[in-house]
Image (cartoon, rainbow, N blue to C red):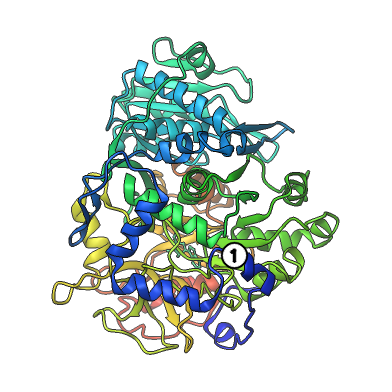
Amino acid sequence: MSQPTIESILHEERLFQPAADFSQQAQIKSLEQYQQLYDKAKADPQAFWAELAATELHWFQKWDTVLDWQPPFAKWFVNGKINISYNCLDRHLTTWRRNKAALIWEGEPGDSRTLTYAQLHREVCQFANVLKQLGVKKGDRVGIYMPMIPEAAIAMLACARIGAVHSVVFGGFSAEALRDRLMDVQAKLVVTADGGWRKDAIVPLKEQVDKALANNSAPAVANVLVVRRTEQTIAMEPGRDHWWHDLQAGVSADCPAEPMDSEDMLFVLYTSGSTGKPKGVVHTTGGYNLYTHMTTKWIFDLKDTDVYWCTADVGWITGHSYIVYGPLSNGATSVMYEGAPRASNPGCTWDMIEKYGVNIFYTAPTAIRAFIKMGEHLPNARNLDSLRLLGTVGEPINPEAWMWYHRIIGKERCPIVDTWWQTETGGIMITPLPGAVPTKPGSATLPFPGILAEIVDLEGDPVPPNEGGYLAVRHPWPGMMRTVYGDPDRFRRTYWEHIPPKDGAYLYFAGDGARRDEDGYFWVMGRVDDVINVAGHRLGTMEIESALVSHPFVAEAAVVGKPDDLKGEEIVAFVTLENNITASDQLKNELKKHVVQEIGAIARPGEIKFAEALPKTRSGKIMRRLLRSLAAGEEISGDTSTLEDRSVLEKLREG
Ligand code: WT7
């Protein structure tokens, strides 16, 4: 199986209509209805969003201006007062949903737990009071470094409830990476667990927190709250570390949601870009609440009886928007799973669907390719009749994987929503609405109503159908990121000036290459910057290079992505060594370990190639294009005339 290529998708002519019985019961029932919504939103985006904000969410106080757009800075629902934790919890308590399952959690060694809306509300209120007792105030930042357990969602909602800003760091990141993020965001408190379960092993989360905080390196952190999960022995620093269950015991469950300004910061989530330093993507309250609410409702076609399962980790934006905030704001039942398919339990995904009667299943193409490899006998041996809708996110899906998902999991009955979006966009941007838009395998199809997506060249001029260009968005939308934490200038440069604004009209530059076909369908090809996508995880090549050169034996490093059947891309690092250092397989392993230590296992290079020198232009820029071709084993094509020293290439080729 291979990644989509221009050739394979240019010849993609299959079109799948939503089944009539699906459309009849759907939130959005026909292409005409989609088109009407799209046109209405395009004609007057502010009126469109304002109407939905008024009917779909609870506000303590209504806004007075829908949008204040001082490019590239947007404010939505100015002076509106709202609390997303209230919208996710309190407002359901006065309805029959009070005792409906909000979270169904399945933990690793066979644990499970269901929290109704009333129970989740209680836990969130108590934990919010714990945070207050420890001196956490509105606007303070709280780091969350957790396994996939309900307490992760509880901690997020508790922060939102009192106006603290959460910054979740994926539990697979190393102590080093955690420290960088806690320092950048100046976290006052960290929530973690004694450990988490990951494929039959324990991840020592608390130990990593201790390392991250050693030598007073994130001095703002005054307290660490620890959930008991794996029951292993851990060190607890008196005065700083506290057990969650100790502090939660006997605490009042009365904690009214703080009326937040619509533009108050809700969270900061770090993501990789084309420089060495990850960016803190800032999302605010009102617009994000509305955008995740509406996209969840229409794209996943939520019904009150649905059991919805998104397999992401809460450490990524998908977990924020589509495990926690979007589903709970809609009063849905959201499944949270700590486990992952592995040799000892390869069919666990299908067991989960059968066990909980999952109706809507949202996962990543890399997971689907792994399912294919593990064999269709696994899903075929389970009853998957409950499924009615499937989704994918994170990277382009190759048509073969799409077809397998459609046939083997969806039994040719369930629509597939291939959803394109980013940490920065807050929610899904390009996607089919499942009862309305016919799908083509490998295409994310059409923009969500209110999203003006375009394919342009670097001047911002439109590119004709079927020609490759840059994916860009023209008008602000409620879920968009507001800034880079602590660096508004970087926000402007990275996203809004890459394509120079014309006559005051700004275009959001997504960093993806794409094309639109003759039906207006979007085909996303992948990143056009120095970002690579390994098993659905976004990594900056410069970040990995910085990690490599921080090793004393490394002189220079250049990292590229190489196409990989399973992971989408695999990390290949070209490394030159300091004088007197001898290349060896042992050193390769040491360097791989070093990257894992600096960033985390997700960044472990698949291959390290030692080189005498790296190919550079006369101005000293590493020619990554040549390295990409070399890594992929392709012929070097295109212009090499700018290469400073041609013999470098010959030597690299010879290996
Ligand atoms: C990048 C954003 C947004 C949730 C997970 C990733 C790629 C995402 C698709 C898709 C093709 C996709 C893009 C994008 N991407 N979804 N359906 N088809 N590519 O969030 O870590 O911020 O990464 O993921 O390259 O720019 P992220």
Q: Is residue 3 above or below residue 332?
A: below
User: Would you name the residue on which mark 1 appears?
Assistant: 26
Give x and y (percent) for residue 574: 45, 61
Q: Residue furthest front?
A: 95
Write down the quadrant of residue 190 in the picture. top left
Give x and y (percent) for residue 643: 32, 78
Q: Residue at x 43, y 20 (%)?
A: 254
Q: Residue at x 56, y 57 (%)?
A: 535
Q: Residue at x 56, y 86 (%)?
A: 7
Q: Nearer the viewer, residue 16 or 10?
A: 16
Q: Is residue 454 above or below residue 272?
A: below
Give x and y (percent) for residue 478: 33, 57
Q: Is residue 530 visible?
A: yes
Write down the quadrant of residue 471 in the picture. bottom left
Is 44 situated left or right of 336 in this image? left
Q: Nearer the viewer, residue 225 or 4?
A: 225
Look at the numbered disc 1 and give the secondary structure of its residue: loop
Q: Is residue 554 visible?
A: no
Q: Is residue 619 above or below residue 114?
A: below
Q: Residue at x 57, y 66 (%)?
A: 417
